[in-house]
C-alpha cells in the first residue's frame, strides 16, 4: 500500500471481524526535519517540538514529536485501506511520547461489522507502536464499507 492511495478494493461481503487489513504502515526513523515539516503543515509551532534548548529547559532530553503526527499516520493507514470518504467516526488516545529517531508502525483490526443508518459499517481498533512494540497512540475508527 502506498500512503495516500485512494482506491478502495474492500467489500462488505469480504470483510469479517478479526481482519487485520494490509501490512502495517511503517514510518521513520523520525527526523527533526519530519517534525518541523509537520509543524509547518499543521501550524503548530510550539517550540518544545523543534527547539532543543527549549525542550531541555522543560526537562526533556530532546524535542518531542508532535502528537498529531503519529495520530495522522494511524489515520492514514486506515483510510488508505477503507477510504477517506468512508470515515464516519474517529478518535485517538495518546499513550506514550514519541521522540526523534523513533520508528512507528501503524495497523488495526476489524472488531465489529454491522448495519446502521442504512449503511454497512465496520469499527476498527488501531494501534501505532514504536520500535520497541510499545503503543504510542491508540485509535478507533468507524467506516462505511461498499457492498
Image (spheres, rainbow, N blue to C red):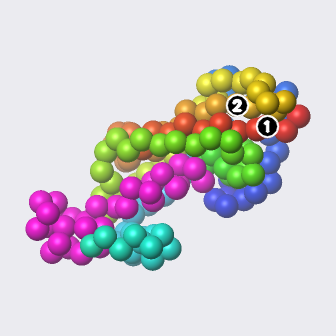
In the visual, does 145 lie left or right of 108? right
Residue at image location 25% in from the left, 67% down from the top: 48
Confirm whether residue 23 shows in the render.
no
Q: Nearer the viewer, residue 23 or 113?
A: 113
In the displayed structure, would residue 112 be above or below residue 74? Answer: above
- The residue that disc 2 covers is 122
Q: Residues within 10 Å of mark 1 (few under 14, many from 20)?
A: many
Q: Secondary structure at mark 2?
A: strand
Quote the CA–CA distance across marks 1 and 2: 7 Å
Q: Which mark is residue 60?
A: none
Residue at image location 34% in from the left, 41% down from the top: 95
Q: Is residue 62 magenta?
A: yes
Q: Residues within 10 Å of mark 2 (few under 14, many from 20)?
A: many
Q: Is residue 51 magenta?
A: yes
Q: Are marks 1 and 2 in contact (CB under 8 Å)?
A: yes
Confirm whether residue 140 shows in the render.
yes
Q: Secondary structure at mark 1?
A: loop
In the visual, does 13 lie left or right of 72? right
Q: Position of residue 72 (x, y in %)?
A: 52, 55
Residue segment shown in magenta = 48-76
In the visual, does 41 lie left or right of 57? right
In the visual, does 94 lie left or right of 91? left
Q: Nearer the viewer, residue 99 or 45?
A: 45
Q: Position of residue 87 (x, y in %)?
A: 69, 45
Which residue ends up furthest to the front in the rendered image?
A: 117
Residue at image location 58% in from the left, 43% down from the top: 90
In the displayed structure, would residue 19 be above or below residue 69? Answer: above
- The residue that disc 1 covers is 145
Q: Earlier in the sequence, mark 1 or mark 2?
A: 2
Quadrant of the drawing holding the C terminus: top right
Q: Position of residue 92 (x, y in %)?
A: 47, 43
Q: Position of residue 59 (x, y in %)?
A: 12, 60
Amino acid at each position: 500500500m502506498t500512503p495516500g492511495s485512494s482506491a478502495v478494493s474492500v467489500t462488505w461481503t469480504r470483510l469479517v471481524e478479526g481482519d487485520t487489513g494490509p501490512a502495517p504502515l511503517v514510518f521513520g526513523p523520525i527526523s527533526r526535519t519530519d517534525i518541523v515539516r509537520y509543524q509547518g503543515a499543521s501550524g503548530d509551532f510550539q517550540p518544545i517540538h523543534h527547539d532543543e534548548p527549549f525542550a531541555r529547559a522543560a526537562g526533556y532530553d530532546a524535542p518531542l514529536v508532535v502528537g498529531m503526527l503519529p495520530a495522522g499516520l494511524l489515520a492514514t493507514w486506515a483510510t488508505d485501506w477503507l477510504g477517506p470518504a468512508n470515515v464516519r467516526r474517529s478518535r485517538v488516545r495518546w499513550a506514550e511520547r514519541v521522540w526523534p529517531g523513533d520508528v512507528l508502525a501503524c495497523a488495526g483490526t476489524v472488531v465489529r461489522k454491522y448495519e446502521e443508518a442504512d449503511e454497512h459499517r465496520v469499527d476498527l481498533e488501531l494501534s501505532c507502536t514504536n520500535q520497541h512494540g510499545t503503543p504510542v497512540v491508540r485509535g478507533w475508527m468507524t467506516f462505511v464499507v461498499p457492498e
